[in-house]
Amino acid sequence: MSFGEECERFEQNFAEYQGRKFCVFLNSGSSANLAIIQALLNLNRIKRKDVVGFSALTWSTNVMPLVQLGLNSYPVDIELNTLNVSSRTLEDALSRQPFRGFFLTNLLGFCDDIDKIEKICKEKNIILIEDNCESLGTVYKGRKLGNFGLASTFSFYVGHHMSTIEGGAVCTDDEELAVMLKLVRAHGWDRNLNDFQKEQLRKKFDTCSDFYASYIFYDLGYNFRPTEINGFIGNYQLKYIDEILKKRNSNFMKLAPILYQKAERYYPIKFDHIDFISNFAVPLICKTASIREGLIEKCKNKIEIRPVVIGSLTQQPFFRKYIHFSQDHIQNADIVHKQGLYFGNNPELTEKEIKQIIHVFTKK
């Protein structure tokens, strides 16, 4: 069965864990990103050709839905010491281009002054959406990341904090948005709504035929449904999520103070403003490209490394094909693109492996 009791139970359990009223479970985090933009369009909260800002250091499927759905997108640079958009870089971008929406990425368990970003967006009537796929469990000023915007997206891909093999979610406190997301998830029909919601929708559209009621398509949608297997795995993983996150946090706190002190080799990353940091990878931004090249060679057959997410999104071929934008204002994300890397923060890392990582990244 594609969607049933296990999936519904997971939605309830994950909403409770995140501290949100509603969770809509989907088949991937990328689908969650596309679904939230489609839902906002369906509700006329944003319109085609509106400008939506996004974090320049992010994953491709934050921006692809904006292009695919006819919105104009505008990258916002990050701070080198947090790898995230700050109120300063947001205000700088807004001075050049006003936004109707802002798709903020909470990158790799970190954040900057997201409370100030939230305030700016409220004052300027900007719809704030958080991509929290990489920061499940991080707490800033007593609030979990993913709870600062109108809605937030999550990924349960196999390499992330918790896994449903493939899976994603949108969390929100907005019931109208949650209902629309459920329509978007399943072709635009009402099959996964509760009886009251179905009745309201059918009255609104004068759906008087019971024969056709389950085959009425109320708005634009896709097939983004997860399966009962995904829901079952998610419910099982949630039993251990706190344990998993504590172990990742413990690993990070053993590694980061040592690695980020190597000021001659790496840009320091600030995290003492965060109550609890939860990430699945540890980033290093080298002072020069040659340092990074040396580390790439040094790590071969020892430690798996990769670019920081995908580097600056403005350097990606699809972005340059569809979006015409001057690179002058994305300087920090470009440094990360040219000089950054990260390695995995697996909850099953041993003390021996942690010592090996420290040795590789601190010894010349």
Image (cartoon, rainbow, N blue to C red):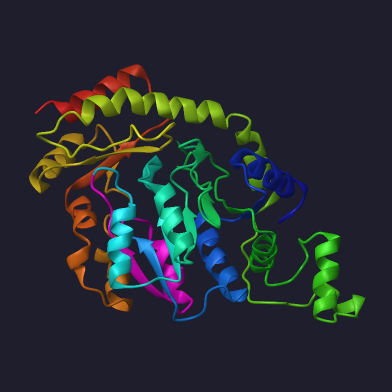
**Percent position (x, y) of residue 147?**
54, 47
The answer to whether 311 is drawn above or below residue 136 in the figure is below
Q: Is residue 146 left or right of residue 318?
A: right
Residue 81 quadrant:
top left
- Say which quadrant the N terminus sits in: bottom right
Position of 331 relative to 18 (above/below):
below
Q: Which residue is at 41% across, 48% downward?
A: 114
Residue 261: image location, x then y, percent: 18, 28
Residue 318 in the figure: left or right of residue 201? left
Query: Residue 42's spot in the image, x, y percent?
Result: 61, 75
Q: In the image, is residue 320 part of the stretch drawn in magenta? A: no
| Residue 173 is at least partly visible in this image | yes
Q: Residue at x 29, y 69 (%)?
A: 95
Q: Percent position (x, y) of residue 228?
A: 70, 49
Q: From this viewpoint, which residue is outermost toward the front?
A: 123
Q: Nearer the viewer, residue 16 or 311?
A: 16
Count the labels in the image: 0
In the image, 275 versus 264, the foreground residue is: 275
In the image, residue 64 lies in the stretch drawn in magenta: yes
Which residue lies at the image location 72% right of the left edge and 55% below the top edge?
3
As drawn, is 22 to the left or to the right of 258? right
For residue 56, say whether it is visible: no
* Whether residue 175 is situated above or below residue 265 in the rendered picture: below
Image quarter where the C terminus lies is top left
Magenta stretch, residue numbers: 56-80
What residue is drawn where x is 41% and y is 31%?
Answer: 346
Residue farthest toward the top in the current orientation of the protein = 351
